[in-house]
Amino acid sequence: MTVAAWTWTYEGYEPEAERLREALCALGNGYFVTRGAATEALPGPAHYPGTYAAGCYNRLTSTVAGRRIENEDLVNLPNWLPLRYRMRPADAPPGPWLSPDHPQLAEHRQTLDLRHGTLTRWSVYEDAAGRRLSVEQCRLVHMGDPHLAALRTSFTTAGWAGEVEVVAGIDGDVRNAGVARYRELASRHLTGCDTGSEDDDTVWLRCRTIESGIHIAMAGRTRTAVGGTASDGGGAASGGVTPRTELTSQRAFHTLMLPVEPGSTVVVDKTVALYTSRDPAIGNPLRAAVDGVRRAPDFPGLLASHHRAWKHLWQQAKLDVPGDSGRILRLHLFHVLQTLSPHTAELDAGVPARGLHGEAYRGHVFWDELFVLPFLNLHFPEVSRALLGYRYRRLPSACRAASEAGRAGAMYPWQSAGDGREETQEFHLNPRSGRWLPDHSRLQHHVGSAVAYNVWQYCRASGDTAFLHTKGAEMLLQIARFWAAAADWDEDLGRYRIRGVVGPDEYHDGYPGAAEPGLDDNAYTNVTAAWVLMRALVLCRDLPEARRQQLFERIQLAPDERERWDDIAHRLHVPYHQGVISQFAGYADLAELDWDGYRRQYGDIRRLDRILEAEGDTVNRYQASKQADVLMLGYLFPPAELAAVFRQLGYAVDDDVWRATVDYYLHRTSHGSTLSALVHAWVLARARRADAWMYCEEALTGDVADVQGGTTAEGIHLGAMAGTLDFVQRGMTGLEAHEHALWLDPVPIPQLSKFRVRLRYGRHWDVDLRIRARRVRIAVPESDTAAVRVRLGGRSYTVAPGTTRWLDLSGS
C-alpha cells in the first residue's frame, strides 16, 4: 500500500485482504454507501459487495439456542455493481470470465481518491497466447445527487482483435451474509423482486423488505463509447452496438459485444439510480429511479459535478495535520462525510456504529454519536440537529420502554434501529468457544446520558436555543426523570444508588455467582446521571415562561419532581477504593488478573471476555475492563467541569486523585474496543502527556491496520474515526464553543504540535485556528458579523472579522 496526501493505493491483489480493502475503499454520500467490491467478482470468501441506505432496516425471526428471537438489520440492498467481461478473439473460442481471482491476472492496482471521492481500479490480463486486456474502472457514488452512482470501465487491447463481451446489470438475489458469526441467523430481507427495461439502454429492478415493507427501486443505464467518447444513448450506442437485455425475476442485465482492434479502447458507462419509499417528495420509487437515470448526465458530467460537491465539503471540514497522521485523519474524515453528509440532514437516520460500510452490529445505532457529534457540531450543525431529531422521534418509544420497566421518563435503548425499540440481541456468539451466551448489554442505560449530553453540547456549540427550548428540552427532562426514578435511597450510606446497570466497560455485566445481571453504582453512570439532573434543572430555570409552562404540561411534570432531582443530583453515591474512583461498587473485591501470563499464552487479549469464557471462566471475576469506563468521565468533561461535578456530589477529585485513577485503570484495560485507545489518548494528553501518543497512534491506525483482527472488513468504526478528528479539533486545543466565546486550553503533544482546523462558530462559517508549537493563530473571515471572543489562559481577546491574531499559549 502506498499513501499520498489525498490517495490510498493498493498495489497487487491479495485475496485475504480484499474484504478489508472493500470497507476502506467504500464510497457513499450520506444517503447510501457501496463497499469497494470488484464489479466482476462473485460474492465469496474474498469478496462481499454490499450497498446500504441510511435508516433502511428490516426485522427477521431466527431460532438461536432453541429460542425464537428477532433481529433488525440494516438491509443489504440489490447489488448495482455487477459488470463482468471476457475476451472473444476473432481467431479463438471465447475466453473465461475475468476477475482479479483468475490466473490470467498479470497486474492489479486500486486507488482511492479522497479529494474527489472516486475509486479507480486497474487490471491487466494476459492469456496463454499473449493476448492482453487492460481494464481501468472509475467508480463514484454521487455526492451532489444522493440517488446516483456510476462506473466508467475502459478496455484496451494488445495483440488481438475481436470483441470484448460485457455483461452489466443489477442483481436482487442478495442477503445479509457479511458477518460470519451471524450466518446461522435468518438473512434474506428482500422479497417481491420484479424486473423490466426502459428504452434500449435502461433496466430496472424493484423489491421490498419483508417485514418493514420498504419499497426499493434501482434503474441502471448502460452506454458504450469508443476512445472515451460516450454515446448519446437512446438506441444503438457508438459503433452500432445495441445492448441485449436479459431479465429474470431477480436480475436485470445488459449484454454488449464491443468490437476491438489491437491497441483500441472501448468504454462502457453504467449509471444507476436508487430510491426507496422512505424518500421524501417522490411518488413511486421505480418511476423516480427510471426518471433519475434518464435525466442523469453522461459520466464526464457526473464526475465534474461530483468533484464540485466534494470540493465544497472539504472546504467546510478542513483539518490539516502534517505527515502520516494527517493522511490517516483525512481518510477518517472522508468516511465520516460519506456516512453523515449534508444529505443526512434530510433523512430519518441515526449514527450507525459501523458506518454504512458493512453489517457488523447489524447497522444499529449505539452511543457512538457521543464521539461523532462534537466534530459535526463545528462543521455541519444541521447534520447534528438531524441526528438528534432521530432521537427525538423515538422519544415516545423510550418513554414506553421506561414505563414497561416500571419507571418514569425515557429509557433509550442501547441498540436502536428503525422504530426506537431495544434492538440489543438476547444472545451473542463467542466465536472462540462456539457457544451462544446471554447478552445483558441492554442494561447500559448510560446511553440516555449520552443523548442528553449530545443535546447540550450541540446547542452550546451552535447557539441553537430554538432546539434546546423545544425538542432538546423535552428529551433532556425525560431522561432526567428516568434517572430520578432509577435512584433508590440507601439509609445506611445516606446516599442514593443506581443498581442493576452495565457501564461502558461492557465486560462486567454482573457480580460473580449472582442470579441476576447488572452492577451497582457504576461511577460513570452515576456521575453522568447527576450531570443530567443538574442540566435539566438549569434548563427548567432558563426556559422562557410560556415555553416552560407548555412543556411542563405536555410531560405532566409535577412540582415536587424538580426538588427530588436536585436532592439526587447532590447525593448520588460514587464508590472509591485505595484512593481512586471505583468502576462500580465491589470492584475492589474482584481478583487481579495475570495479565502477563495471558499475554504470553494468547498474544492478543483484546477480547479477554471470549478467552476466559472459552476456558470456562468469566471476566466478571476480575479487575479487567474491555475499554475506558471511569476514564470516560475525563473524555466528557474538562478538568474544571469534572471537578465541579464531583464537588456537587460532595466528593473531591483533585489532580492527584484523578492521576491515581488514570494510572490504576491503565493497567487493567484490554482495549477490546476501538474507542478505548481514543479515550485514553484524550485523557492522557492532560494527565500523562508523554504516554498519550501511543494510544493516539493506535486510535489512528485502528481501521487502517485492522488492529481488532478482522473487524474492519465488517464495517469501519465510525465513532473512533470521528473521535480522532475531534481529538485534534478539541482534545489538542481544549476548545469549548460557548455561546459568547471560544474557550481554548491547548495541550499539544510533540507528535501533534502543528495543525490547522477551520470551524463554523455562530454566524462565522470559516474561523481558522492554527497551532504552531507554543502559539495559536486565530483568523476570522471578513463579514458584517460581530467579533469572535476568545478565552485563553484566563484572559479574553477579540478577533474582529477580517483580522488575524497570534496568541502565545502562555496567554500573552
Image (tube, helix red, strand yellow):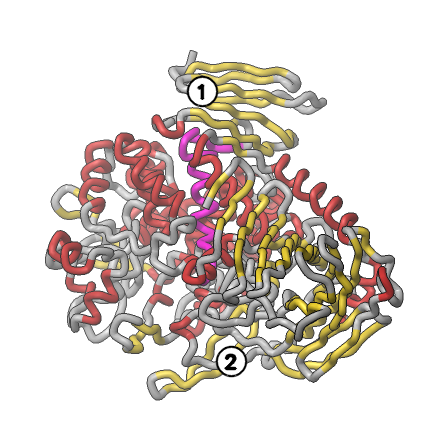
The reply to whether residue 240 is visible in this rendering is: yes
Q: Please say if 787 is above or below 725.
A: above
The secondary structure making up most of the magenta span is helix
Q: List x then y, in percent, for residue 673.
A: 34, 54
Number of marks in picture: 2
Q: Please say if 421 is above or below 734.
A: below
Q: Residue at x 62, y 38 (%)?
A: 314
Q: Amino acid at mark 2?
A: Leu
- The answer to if 722 sits in the magenta stretch is yes
Q: Nearer the viewer, mark 1 or mark 2?
A: 1
Q: Residue at x 61, y 51 (%)?
A: 120
Q: Which residue is mark 2?
A: 60
Q: Alpha carbon of mark 1 to alpha carbon of mark 2: how far?
A: 54 Å
Q: Please say if 736 is above or below 264.
A: above
> Quadrant location of the C terminus?
top left
- The answer to if 744 sits in the magenta stretch is no
Q: Amino acid at mark 1?
A: Arg
Q: List x then y, in percent, for residue 358.
A: 50, 63
The reply to whether residue 346 is visible in this rendering is: no
Residue nearer the viewer, 686 or 141: 141
* Drawn side of residue 385 relative to residue 22, left or right: right
Q: Residue at x 64, y 76 (%)?
A: 172
Label 1 or label 2, whichever comes before in sequence order: 2
Secondary structure under badge 1?
Answer: strand
Secondary structure under badge 2?
Answer: strand
Residue nearer the viewer, 773 or 202: 202
Is there CB contact under 8 Å for labels 1 and 2?
Answer: no
- The part of the image, by quadrant, that contains residue 678 is top left
Q: Residue at x 37, y 83 (%)?
A: 64
Q: Which residue is mark 1?
A: 772
Identify the residue at the far bottom of this view. 66
For the record, the magenta segment spans: 713-738
